[in-house]
Amino acid sequence: MFKEFKEFAMRGNVLDMAVGIVIGAAFGRIVTSFVEDMLMPPIGLLLGKVDFSNLFLSLTGQSFDSLERVREIAEQLPSLRKVVVVPNLEERPDVSDIPKAVTLDEWLRLFAVWQSQRDGR
Protein backbone atom coordinates (compact mmCIF):
# COMPACT_ATOMS: atom_id res chain seq x y z
CA MET A 1 0.00 0.00 0.00
CA PHE A 2 2.81 2.41 0.87
CA LYS A 3 4.56 1.54 -2.40
CA GLU A 4 1.42 2.42 -4.38
CA PHE A 5 1.04 5.74 -2.59
CA LYS A 6 4.71 6.52 -3.22
CA GLU A 7 4.26 5.82 -6.94
CA PHE A 8 1.16 8.04 -7.02
CA ALA A 9 2.83 10.88 -5.15
CA MET A 10 5.96 10.77 -7.26
CA ARG A 11 4.13 11.00 -10.59
CA GLY A 12 4.61 14.72 -10.62
CA ASN A 13 1.28 16.43 -10.11
CA VAL A 14 0.99 15.82 -6.37
CA LEU A 15 4.64 16.65 -5.78
CA ASP A 16 4.37 19.85 -7.83
CA MET A 17 1.26 20.86 -5.93
CA ALA A 18 2.94 20.26 -2.56
CA VAL A 19 5.97 22.33 -3.58
CA GLY A 20 3.65 25.10 -4.79
CA ILE A 21 1.76 25.15 -1.50
CA VAL A 22 4.97 25.39 0.52
CA ILE A 23 6.37 28.18 -1.69
CA GLY A 24 3.04 30.03 -1.63
CA ALA A 25 2.82 29.90 2.15
CA ALA A 26 6.40 31.14 2.53
CA PHE A 27 5.85 33.95 0.02
CA GLY A 28 2.69 35.01 1.84
CA ARG A 29 4.60 35.32 5.11
CA ILE A 30 7.37 37.29 3.40
CA VAL A 31 4.90 39.78 1.90
CA THR A 32 3.04 40.17 5.22
CA SER A 33 6.27 40.77 7.10
CA PHE A 34 7.49 43.26 4.49
CA VAL A 35 4.28 45.30 4.65
CA GLU A 36 3.90 45.24 8.44
CA ASP A 37 7.54 45.66 9.44
CA MET A 38 9.18 47.63 6.63
CA LEU A 39 6.56 49.48 4.57
CA MET A 40 3.98 50.74 7.08
CA PRO A 41 6.27 52.16 9.84
CA PRO A 42 7.89 54.79 7.54
CA ILE A 43 4.49 55.69 6.11
CA GLY A 44 3.21 56.08 9.67
CA LEU A 45 6.12 58.41 10.50
CA LEU A 46 5.49 60.49 7.40
CA LEU A 47 1.82 60.85 8.33
CA GLY A 48 2.61 62.07 11.83
CA LYS A 49 3.52 58.99 13.87
CA VAL A 50 0.40 56.99 12.97
CA ASP A 51 0.39 53.48 14.42
CA PHE A 52 -1.30 51.25 11.85
CA SER A 53 -1.21 48.16 14.08
CA ASN A 54 -4.40 49.16 15.92
CA LEU A 55 -6.34 50.58 12.98
CA PHE A 56 -8.98 48.52 11.28
CA LEU A 57 -11.88 48.90 8.89
CA SER A 58 -15.08 46.96 9.44
CA LEU A 59 -16.25 45.62 6.10
CA THR A 60 -19.59 44.54 7.58
CA GLY A 61 -20.47 47.98 8.94
CA GLN A 62 -20.34 46.67 12.51
CA SER A 63 -19.07 49.23 15.01
CA PHE A 64 -16.99 48.38 18.05
CA ASP A 65 -17.67 50.24 21.27
CA SER A 66 -14.17 51.09 22.40
CA LEU A 67 -15.54 53.93 24.57
CA GLU A 68 -17.15 51.32 26.81
CA ARG A 69 -13.72 49.71 27.32
CA VAL A 70 -12.17 53.12 28.06
CA ARG A 71 -14.88 53.77 30.66
CA GLU A 72 -14.19 50.40 32.34
CA ILE A 73 -10.47 51.12 32.52
CA ALA A 74 -10.95 54.71 33.76
CA GLU A 75 -13.19 53.50 36.57
CA GLN A 76 -10.46 51.12 37.76
CA LEU A 77 -7.81 53.88 37.97
CA PRO A 78 -8.79 56.30 40.75
CA SER A 79 -5.54 58.28 40.46
CA LEU A 80 -6.22 59.08 36.80
CA ARG A 81 -6.32 62.83 36.24
CA LYS A 82 -7.69 63.09 32.70
CA VAL A 83 -8.76 60.82 29.85
CA VAL A 84 -8.38 62.36 26.41
CA VAL A 85 -10.50 60.65 23.76
CA VAL A 86 -9.27 61.09 20.19
CA PRO A 87 -12.15 60.47 17.80
CA ASN A 88 -11.21 58.88 14.51
CA LEU A 89 -14.60 58.02 13.02
CA GLU A 90 -17.22 60.11 14.79
CA GLU A 91 -17.10 63.88 14.87
CA ARG A 92 -17.89 64.18 18.58
CA PRO A 93 -18.22 60.96 20.54
CA ASP A 94 -20.27 61.06 23.73
CA VAL A 95 -17.75 60.78 26.57
CA SER A 96 -20.07 61.97 29.34
CA ASP A 97 -20.20 58.56 31.05
CA ILE A 98 -16.40 58.16 31.14
CA PRO A 99 -14.91 59.54 34.38
CA LYS A 100 -12.66 62.60 33.84
CA ALA A 101 -12.88 62.25 30.05
CA VAL A 102 -12.73 64.99 27.44
CA THR A 103 -12.43 64.87 23.68
CA LEU A 104 -9.24 66.01 22.00
CA ASP A 105 -10.66 69.36 20.87
CA GLU A 106 -11.89 70.12 24.44
CA TRP A 107 -8.49 69.21 25.85
CA LEU A 108 -6.69 71.42 23.33
CA ARG A 109 -8.88 74.37 24.35
CA LEU A 110 -8.18 73.69 28.04
CA PHE A 111 -4.48 73.38 27.32
CA ALA A 112 -4.44 76.66 25.38
CA VAL A 113 -6.17 78.48 28.26
CA TRP A 114 -3.80 76.93 30.81
CA GLN A 115 -0.74 77.80 28.75
CA SER A 116 -1.85 81.41 28.18
CA GLN A 117 -2.47 81.83 31.92
CA ARG A 118 0.89 80.29 32.72
CA ASP A 119 2.73 82.52 30.23
CA GLY A 120 0.71 85.62 31.22
CA ARG A 121 -0.72 86.25 27.76
Image (spheres, rainbow, N blue to C red):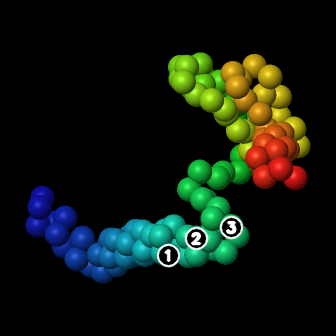
Disc 3 marks a residue whose amino acid type is Gly
Q: Nearer the viewer, residue 111 or 92?
A: 111
Q: Is residue 111 left or right of residue 22?
A: right
Residue designated by label 1:
38
Question: Is residue 23 among the parts visible in the rendering?
Answer: yes
Q: Residues within 10 Å of mark 3 (few under 14, many from 20)?
A: few
| Location of the N terminus (image quadrant) | bottom left
Whether tag 1 and tag 3 are in contact, CB under 8 A, the answer is no
Whether tag 1 and tag 2 are in contact, CB under 8 A, the answer is yes
Q: Give the mark toward the camera: 1 or 3.
A: 3
Say which residue appears at 68% left-offset and 67% top-offset.
48
Question: Is residue 17 among the parts visible in the rendering?
Answer: no
Q: Residues within 10 Å of mark 1 (few under 14, many from 20)?
A: few
Residue designated by label 3:
48
Q: Residue furthest front?
A: 120
Disc 2 marks a residue whose amino acid type is Met
SS at circle 1? helix
On residue 40, the disc is 2
Coordinates of residue 109 in the picture (x, y in percent): 85, 44
Disc 1 to disc 2, C-alpha distance: 6 Å
Q: Nearer the viewer, residue 80 or 52?
A: 80
- In the picture, residue 8 is in which quadrant? bottom left
Say which residue appears at 51% left-offset and 67% top-offset.
36
Coordinates of residue 106 in the picture (x, y in percent): 84, 39
